[in-house]
Amino acid sequence: MKCNSYYRFFRNLANKVKVDILECLKEKELSVSDISIRTKLEQSKVSHALSNLKCCGLVECKRKGKEIIYSLNKQMILPLLKIIDKHKCSMCNCGRRG
């Protein structure tokens, strides 16, 4: 089955675990164990989510000694997150129910 790139991209942004990881990485670059501590998730779950995020180019990684350090793909994801934040408050009735 051929994977639709839009589906794969938005599926990553529609997953709470992955969004929580992106939120952590907005603050600073982190290792899997640091992300695991901050999100209170198992390291294996964090690693799996990071693998998917990396595959779509949402995060980048570099080796620092024995650790792999993850960071946001700032050129692509930060502008996108700003657009989403602007949209949610202007178009999604931010803070209102109904």
Image (spheres, rainbow, N blue to C red):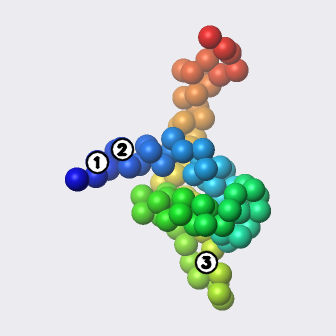
In the rendered view, tell whether residue 86 sits above or below residue 77.
above
Question: Which residue is located at x 44 percent, y 45 percent?
Answer: 11
Alpha carbons under labels 1 and 3: distance apart: 29 Å
Whole-percent x, y for residue 17 in the image: 61, 50
Alpha carbons under labels 1 and 2: distance apart: 5 Å
Residue 81 shows in this picture: yes
Say what amino acid the circle numbered 3 marks.
Ile
Q: Which mark is residue 68?
A: 3
Alpha carbons under labels 2 and 3: distance apart: 27 Å
The residue to which callout 2 is attached is: 7
The residue to which callout 1 is attached is: 4
Secondary structure of the residue carrying numbered label 3: strand
The answer to which image quadrant residue 85 occupies is top right
Q: Earlier in the sequence, mark 1 or mark 3?
A: 1
Whole-percent x, y for residue 6 in the image: 34, 44
Question: Which residue is located at x 65 percent, y 49 percent?
Answer: 20
